[in-house]
Amino acid sequence: MPVVPRPKNGRVRKDCLLDMANSTSEDVETRAARAKEELMGLTVTARTKKLYSSRVELLENSMKFLNVERQQKGMQPLAWSLAMFTIWLHHMWQIGMGVSTPGYVNAVLFVQRSGSFGTWALDNTDEIRRLVKGATYDGGSKRQKAKRAQMDLPMFEAFVEWLHETNRPPSMILAVTLCFGAALRLKELIGLKPEHVIITSEHDVFLNLPNKSYKAGNDKPPRVDKPVTEHRAIDALFIAMEDVPTGEYIFRPTLWNEKALREAVKEWASQHAIEFLDKGVDNVFIDGMHCLRHGGMALIKEKVLEAMGKMMKSELGTCSAKNVDNYARPNSKRGPKKRSRS
């Protein structure tokens, strides 16, 4: 069917009416389905729609993983249903993520109303809302949301070994090493250029970065020189800088980009999820490169910050001293109270 442009003068166009006059009943149904999906997409902001898409994708990937395991055992595959979704909500409550259940319900309702998610339906929404209320209610108050973990030194070393085993690009491994050793944000990492690297006469190394603790919202933040103290981070920086001309990014988006970097962290974390549970790390989550910054900050604080004192925290972390303490908090002291996995 031809795409009819939106009128600019606010009047119904004759060609639109003629197009409808020549349409069969099947064309009308097809056009109505497209119109419904498009108009449903306009009912939420782009950011919310992105969240909905990621949640639905997680549901679909979880079902794929489940059915692969069932197939290996010679069992029949499962499909999403109201019963399966109820079990999912209960699982979210068990792992202390009950506060996230309303988002999953809204995501499924949204895609179902646009006709783009399976053949089952959350038809009894009143009952589902009560289930969600039960998942988010805990002893008179809502359960806290799980916190982002820090990738501590043993995790980082295991992660780098995994990157080598899975044949990731050498530049990605250098980027990860620098991000951890210098406790960088991902945007700071991919925005680095040779002119941002400062080497003093005493051979100290600094990175010239935007000062994120700057509060003014109307101006670009001033830049601050952040010292790089970890030898492995310095080595990775110098290797990555080789043959990179001034004005070019040190980590140029060629073999990988920032999304690939995030997905690598998530993939590694998902493969070690059971191991983390056995170690008691079940009240936090590893969702991307920022976990490297948390772990790197803990390492810097342990080796350098305590010796330099509180006044140096904001300079090394390019954030407030309070945030430095938050980043450096170990996983055992992060997130809500652990729930028994019985």
Image (cartoon, rainbow, N blue to C red):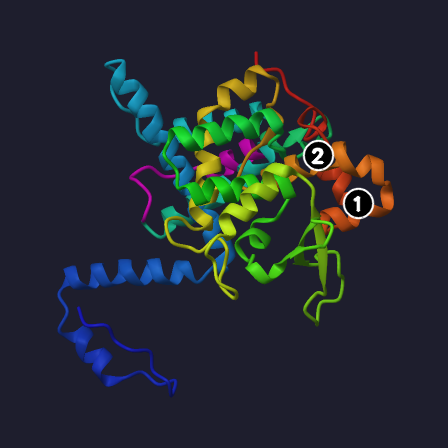
The span shown in magenta is: 116-133
Height in image: 295 above or below 239?
above
User: Residue sitting at 79 percent across and 38 percent down?
Assistant: 305
Between 14 and 154, the one lying in front of the other is 154
Q: Residue 327: give x, y in percent of width and height.
A: 70, 38
- Residue 168 screen position, x and y as percent: 39, 38
Q: In which quarter of the image is the C terminus?
A: top right
Closest to the observer: 41 or 303?
A: 303
Residue, disc 1 = 313
Binning the other alpha carbons within 10 Å of mark 1 as few (below 14), some (14 to 19) or many (20 upward) gives: many
Is there any visible trace of residue 328 in the rendered image? yes
Give the mark nearer the N terminus: 2 vs 1.
2
Assign the N terminus to one quadrant of the image.
bottom left
Of residues 307 and 231, the one nearer the viewer is 231
| Left or right of residue 334, residue 308 in this image | right
Q: Mark 2 points at which residue?
A: 298
User: In this picture, is 25 found above or below 180?
Assistant: below
Q: Which residue is drawn at 23% across and 14% down?
A: 74
- The kind of residue on which mark 2 rests is Ala
Q: In which quarter of the image is residue 198?
A: bottom right
Q: Which secondary structure lies at badge 1?
A: helix
Secondary structure at badge 2 equals: helix
